[in-house]
Image (cartoon, rainbow, N blue to C red):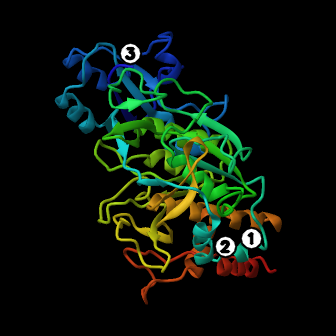
Amino acid sequence: MKSHLVLRLANPIPAPNIPHWEPFILNKANEVGEFGNSLDAVFREYGLPIWITAEYRPASEDGFNAEEIESGLNRTYRVILRQDTTFPPGLVDQIRLHPAVDWVRRGAIAQAVLPVYSEMASTSALSDWPGALIHLPYAHAITKGRADIKVAILDTGVDLDHPEVVGRFVARKDVVDFEGLDTSSFIGDLLQADDDPEDEVGHGTHIAGIIGARGNRIAEGVCSGCRLMAVRVLATMTQNGRRFGAGLIDNINLGIKWAVDNGADVINMSLGVRHEHGGLPHADVIQYALRKGVSVIAAAGNDGTNNKYYPGALPGVLAIGAVDRDGHVAPFSSYGARISFLAPGTGILSSYRDGGYAASSGTSQAAPFVSGAVALLQSLALEHGRRLLSHQIKYLLQQTSERIDRRRHHPKGGYGIINLADAFRLLNYELGM
């Protein structure tokens, strides 16, 4: 793929049958090179011939649905240069100011700084305290989750054969595609979306264990009875012997939409990127997920500052901070997003790549405890014939979390540490049980 921009127009392009970018880059049939408005003159001024492609596929063959249209996905396009060159900064600035354009951003790789892992022999004695801190044994005595509740893990992929999570996954997807980009700092699978989300980093497998581990050699996952979806959105970058996750904002967005369209009830995003390229990262597709009733839980960040990381800083997303085993906010836990809740995030033992086990600390580890908690609450409600909306789940957790001081909402701690025992009691009360 040559250099590209992603932009959202105020109105859809009138031309029918705009090709989706993914098949188009392999087969340049059905070319579209003009917007059909004054934006075309801007590109002609710079002498840059372009291809215009659709950024998103509709959820069904009948076309974009109401939620997709309300979220602007039907008028979001990927503009690809036909020449081996780059977009001049002046052109991008002109496009950004054009009245037909809502926003525009360059296609760029964003690095997701991931925690350091310490590989170790597994032992459940080291992994029991997080569950005790959030009163998980009480919840597990009632339900360990329903098989018809699906939690999507958008991450570096998953070791699908790991003994802790093998057989847990009902859907899988790899949306990483760096075609035409500089990949000299990367290793492993970088090209073409497929159905093999193998984890080359270990981060996604660690998250999967927290949510759904069988409990063979570590603590049982928060919602081990639920089913999981593995969505690889981050590729493998190497630096000084360490592996990191990095990906295109575009690829992450496609992963979010794929998870929604394939039936996710909860999306866990233990990742975050800074706002650097125009248009809030993931904003439109996150709104689509929320409109479809999907709960989105994200890590708040690990630099201990008030920097904002996305999607955690977006409205409607539950941004999760980390605490240690004594219930104190971890010093690395970022707070630029409006923190929703806290969960265990230091020295968390879980599954790791290549069938191994590792301990790590980060808001990445805290987020899946909340994703699992949300899945358990949905499971309990469904046992009584009810389905919870995202704002109802947030209400249950808000009312029952253990505050870290007298304030109802703490800038670094949100509404406090989730308490599943009290959340279950409140839900039973609301259901009239």
Residue 247 spot, x, y in % from top left: 41, 38
Q: Amino acid at mark 3?
A: Gly
The residue shown at (79%, 72%) is: 142
Q: Quadrant of residue 338?
A: bottom left
Q: Amino acid at mark 1?
A: His
Q: Quadrant of residue 222?
A: bottom right
Is there a contact, CB below 8 Å, between mark 3 and mark 1?
Answer: no
Q: Is residue 96 left or right of residue 396?
A: left
Q: Nearer the viewer, mark 2 or mark 3?
A: 2
Quadrant occupied by the C terminus: bottom right
For the residues marked 2 and 3, what is the alpha-carbon distance in whole angstroms? 56 Å
Q: Quadrant of residue 223?
A: bottom right
The residue shown at (35%, 24%) is: 181
Residue 241 spot, x, y in % from top left: 35, 40
Q: Indicate which disc residue 140 carries.
A: 1
Is there a contact, CB below 8 Å, between mark 2 and mark 3?
Answer: no
Q: Earlier in the sequence, mark 2 or mark 3?
A: 3
Is there a contact, CB below 8 Å, between mark 2 and mark 1?
Answer: yes
Q: Is residue 425 left or right of residue 186?
A: right
Q: Indicate which disc residue 33 carries.
A: 3
Q: Badge 3, how many Cα within 10 Å: few under 14, some, many 20+?
A: some
Q: Indicate which disc residue 136 carries.
A: 2
The local secondary structure at tag 1 comes to: helix
